[in-house]
């Protein structure tokens, strides 16, 4: 459509946050006009305005009408609704959570519009795909003539050492979805892993591995899509062999198999090595990953006041106090910490509670290699620190010129990024979504 009319795609950005969707559109190279962004979070809107020069609409989107949405003449909607109703840590109220109501309200307006969008892109946490909200979404989309493809993907599949699996739904109206019968990413967007569902008796278990799903609906106009198996993707770093797994990527303590294919632990380790090391995403001049000498006091080396540098093996290292993990915290919660190193090829997902809590909120960086890996006492010797906001932004693939305005506190920065998305994953999906039919 954009090509025929010689005008950019007109796009609405719902739940815009700090601008992850907009940055993804820019990285995807899609010629588009972001007609309006919507978010109720005041701090997120401050960040968005600081980086893009325009403040999102901050009213309650549940009050929007079909006529008001028609006035935007948008070709596409990008939506990243609140994830709390579907998270493991949340109350899991699903569609009964008030935070889910605005999303369904927006979708319910589509049939009432005279000029509805031609495309939608939805992002949420793993778990959304089994929710009542998801069921309602699919029912609305099918009823209004959309074809959908759904994915669960993680930055690990795109060479970023960051475990953050997320659900994605790409949907187009029938006339723009014809070419979807042959799905493919650009070559530089692989490796991708196919997601499969294993059936055990009457039960169907859906695994949360970072994978690809294409879902068809029998009631959709194009029947072949409902029967078509997802395209096959190969990992160029593992001799171009297809990687299969019915279990989460990083939980490889049990054998994995599917359709007679055995996958060894060595294969998974080899695949993960295709990711860049974490040190590529650091902003602090961290010393090389090496054994700590007996005469090197980590508490002294890595807890120097802001502005001072300590020489270790000839390289200066500056570590602001605010990022150093207190020894008292290590003593109490060391066993619950996820520790990674500069040469690690993965780190855990950073949540909005990172820097406030330790357990399950994100990885900590060890700047000294321990002599023993299984002792809490050794954690005290590893120079543990938090990832900085800039480093978390790097792992989310935010551009170098992304900034927080000065009044956004450190905790607020972590919280806002914890609610953001991975541009490394979203950009190729958007590029694929906006690819025009031939």
Image (spheres, grey):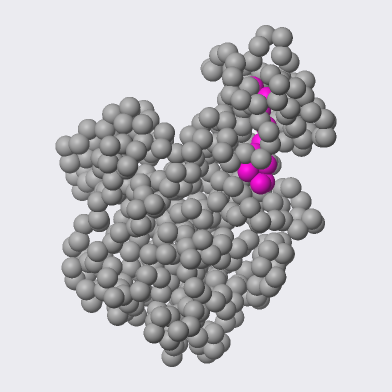
Question: In the image, residue 347 lies at what x, y percent?
Answer: 52, 37
Residues 309 and 257: in front is: 309
Q: Is residue 353 visible?
A: no
Q: Could you say which is closer to the camera, residue 100 or residue 271?
A: 271
| Quarter assignment of residue 122 | bottom left
Q: Residue at x 56, y 75 (%)?
A: 34
Considering only vertical position in the picture, is 324 above or below 137? above
Residue 385 colored magenta?
Answer: yes
Residue 136, given in percent of the width and then of the height, sits at 39, 69
Q: Magenta includes 354?
A: no
From the top left corner, tell me how far across and down residue 406 is, in percent: 79, 55
The answer to whether residue 107 shows anywhere in this view is: yes
Look at the image and tell me in which quarter the N terminus lies.
Answer: bottom left
State whether residue 269 is above or below residue 401. Answer: above
Residue range corresponding to the magenta coloring:
382-391
Depth check: 378 or 283 in front? Answer: 283
Q: Residue furthest top?
A: 294
Instruction: Name the residue: 76% across, 51% down.
Output: 409
Q: Nearer the viewer, residue 425 or 94?
A: 425
The residue that appears at 35% across and 57% down in the rendered structure is 186
Say whether residue 71 is left or right of residue 42: left
Q: Position of residue 242 (x, y in %)?
A: 26, 42
Question: For the point 19% across and 44% down, which residue is it?
Answer: 201
Residue 194 higher or lower than 42, as above or below: above
Instruction: Indicate whether 64 appears above or below 302.
Output: below
Q: Quadrant of residue 175?
A: bottom left
């Amino acid at each position: 459509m954009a090509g025929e009319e010689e005008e950019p795609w007109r796009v609405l950005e719902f739940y815009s946050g700090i601008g992850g969707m907009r940055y993804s559109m820019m990285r995807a190279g899609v010629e588009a006009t972001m007609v309006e962004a919507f978010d109720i979070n005041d701090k997120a809107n401050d960040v968005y305005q600081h980086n893009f020069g325009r403040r999102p609409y901050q009213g309650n989107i549940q009050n929007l009408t079909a006529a008001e949405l028609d006035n935007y003449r948008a070709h596409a909607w990008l939506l990243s609704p609140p994830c709390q109703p579907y998270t493991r840590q949340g109350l899991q109220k699903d569609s009964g959570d008030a935070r889910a109501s605005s999303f369904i309200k927006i979708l319910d307006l589509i049939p009432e519009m005279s000029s509805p969008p031609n495309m939608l892109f939805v992002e949420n946490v793993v778990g959304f795909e089994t929710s009542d909200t998801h069921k309602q979404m699919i029912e609305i989309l099918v009823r209004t003539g959309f074809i959908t493809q759904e994915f669960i993907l993680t930055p690990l599949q795109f060479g970023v050492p960051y475990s953050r699996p997320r659900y994605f739904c790409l949907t187009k109206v029938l006339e723009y979805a014809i070419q979807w019968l042959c799905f493919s990413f650009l070559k530089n967007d692989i490796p991708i892993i196919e997601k499969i569902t294993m059936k055990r008796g009457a039960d169907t278990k859906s695994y949360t591995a970072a994978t690809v799903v294409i879902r068809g609906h029998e009631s959709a106009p194009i029947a072949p899509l409902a029967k078509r198996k997802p395209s096959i993707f190969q990992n160029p770093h593992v001799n171009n062999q297809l990687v299969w797994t019915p279990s989460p990527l990083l939980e490889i303590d049990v054998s994995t198999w599917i359709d007679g294919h055995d996958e060894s632990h060595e294969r998974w380790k080899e695949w993960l090595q295709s990711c860049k090391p974490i040190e590529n995403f650091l902003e602090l001049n961290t010393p090389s990953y090496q054994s700590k000498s007996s005469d090197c006091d980590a508490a002294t080396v890595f807890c120097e006041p802001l502005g001072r540098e300590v020489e270790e093996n000839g390289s200066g290292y500056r570590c602001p106090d605010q990022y150093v993990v207190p020894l008292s915290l290590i003593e109490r919660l060391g066993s619950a910490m996820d520790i990674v190193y500069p040469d690690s090829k993965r780190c855990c997902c950073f949540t909005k509670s990172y820097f406030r809590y330790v357990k399950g909120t994100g990885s900590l960086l060890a700047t000294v290699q321990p002599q023993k890996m299984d002792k809490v006492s050794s954690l005290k010797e590893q120079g543990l620190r938090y990832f900085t906001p800039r480093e978390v932004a790097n792992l989310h693939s935010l551009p170098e010129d992304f900034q927080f305005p000065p009044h956004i506190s450190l905790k607020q920065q972590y919280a806002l990024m914890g609610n953001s998305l991975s541009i490394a994953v979203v950009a190729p999906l958007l590029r694929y979504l906006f690819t025009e039919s031939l």
